[in-house]
Amino acid sequence: MEEEYLEEKRLDEKFTTAYEVVEHRLTALWNAIDAIDTKTHIVIGFASVILVVLGGFYSLEPGAWPHLSLILFATALLSYIVLVVLGVLSYRIRGWSYKPDPATLLQHCEDETCSTSDMKRWVVNECKLACYDNLEKLKKKSTLTNWVLRTFAAETILLVSGLAYALVAR
């Protein structure tokens, strides 16, 4: 009897440790998802401001700007559109896994035949599945956000190059 109790206690400690590790991993995934969305928000905001400010300069004297400068501005405008499309595609990645499902968790709690160790094993497995499910979506979101950042860099270089060429050509 005491041997069964000690075995149950050891198993309980193992699952508690496993749960803490998996919970830490899930928390890191949620933080990464939030960070990626924040980066995308900031980049789209900066890209919009830069485009509007430099677009204002170009609209002051439209005939006074060299053709190459206008071509660079138009190319930057196209890259901005690509940036926004990539940002929207990144935002559309949804359907994150929030396992374990609270209703199912309550069913396990109310089940008289389900021991504490069995329940902890189930919770750890559900959290592990959530990690794997979310990791795949996070990779897609991360890839799109990397392209948003690259497109932002290209847009900025095009806009600054066009403005610099216009200033040097005058």
Image: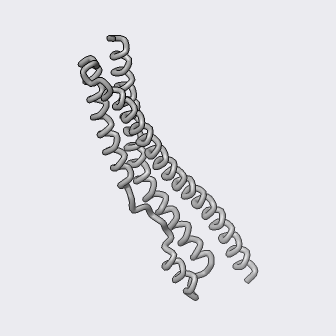
Please tell me which residue lies in front, 90 or 138.
Answer: 90
Report whether 123 appears left or right of 157. right
Please tell me which residue lies in front, 61 or 75.
Answer: 61
Q: Residue furthest right?
A: 2
In percent of width and height, residue 5 lies at 72, 79
In percent of width and height, residue 113 lies at 56, 86
Q: How many marks?
A: 0
In this picture, is 92 found above or below 47?
below
The residue at the point 48 percent across, 73 percent down is: 101
Please tell me which residue lies in front, 102 or 39.
Answer: 39
Report whether 112 appears left or right of 48. right
Which quarter shows the N terminus? bottom right
The residue at the point 57 percent across, 82 percent down is: 109
The residue at the point 37 percent across, 35 percent down is: 52
Q: Which residue lies furthest to the bottom in this view?
A: 112
In this picture, is 73 found above or below 40?
above
The image quadrant that residue 152 belongs to is top left
In percent of width and height, residue 27 lies at 57, 57
The image quadrant that residue 11 belongs to is bottom right
Question: What colour-coding does the image apply?
Answer: one colour
The residue at the point 43 percent across, 42 percent down is: 45
Please tell me which residue lies in front, 124 or 150.
Answer: 150
Which quarter shows the C terminus? top left
In this picture, is 107 found above or below 60?
below
Q: Which residue lies furthest to the top in this view?
A: 169
